[in-house]
Amino acid sequence: MTVELGWIDVRPASAGPPAIGTLGPEGTSSEQAARLLRTRFPDGPPIVLRTTYEQALEDLKAGTVSHVVVANAYRDIHHFYMADDIALASVFVMDTPLYGIARRADGGPLPDRPRVVTHPSPRPLVDQLLPAPYQLPEVATADSTSQAAQAVAERRYDLALTTEPAATRHGLRFISRLRPIRMVWSVFVRT
């Protein structure tokens, strides 16, 4: 369940029609945050999902989106804060969709040491959520938890740390308990 906890008013973009860029593909927590931001606009602008936050930033600089939503847990968010051609427009707190460890719904038995993939930012959840008796040899990374779910659906990995929307989209089922992450989200515009 998404819980909106607070907002700093959204600063308008410098020019052009509104469009919101963020990390995709469909099913990411970032997409859910962008959907929540969209409710702050009268006409519900389109959401543009990109493979990386940096691609969304390039869209912002090129003027193809007016706002970019970035999770404050993102390891390279400092690049957004330090850029001199963009500015922080708003900050809000929102619970992410539920996260858990998922596998293919039609898969057979899992190995004792399954191959796990996740986005780097929520990596600590793998240790919290991986059920016994599975052992963790190493964890691979993907550009998003939705891409991690896709990698499991394509049989490149055994398990993904992913969100409930991404697991549903890719036909995965959870083998762990689920939990949200209470997250701060930053919204950037061009200066």
Image (spheres, grey):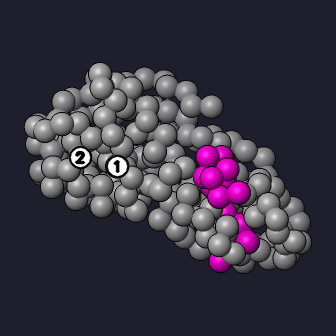
Q: Residue at x 76, y 64 (%)?
A: 104
**Residue at point 39%, 26% (across, down):** 39
Is there any visible trace of residue 119 in the rendered image? no
> Residue 169 colored magenta?
yes
**Which quarter of the rendered picture does the N terminus lie within?**
top right
Q: Left or right: where does residue 33 sit relative to residue 47?
A: right
User: What is the three-letter code of the residue carrying label 2?
Assistant: Val
Give the side of residue 61 with respect to residue 127, left or right: left
Task: Give the residue type that dot 1 points to.
Answer: Val
54 relative to 157, above or below: above
Viewer-side residue, 123 vs 27: 27
Specify few, some or many for label 1: CA neighbours under 10 Å numbering under 14, 14-19, or 20 or more: some
- The residue tagged 1 is 48
Residue 154, x across and y down, in percent = 65, 72
Q: Of helix, strand and loop, which one carries label 1? A: strand
Q: Which residue is mark 2?
A: 65
Residue under the image location 40 percent in, 39 percent down: 34
What is the secondary structure assignment of the residue under circle 2?
loop
Q: Are marks 1 and 2 in contact (CB under 8 Å)?
A: yes
Q: Which residues are magenta?
A: 156-171
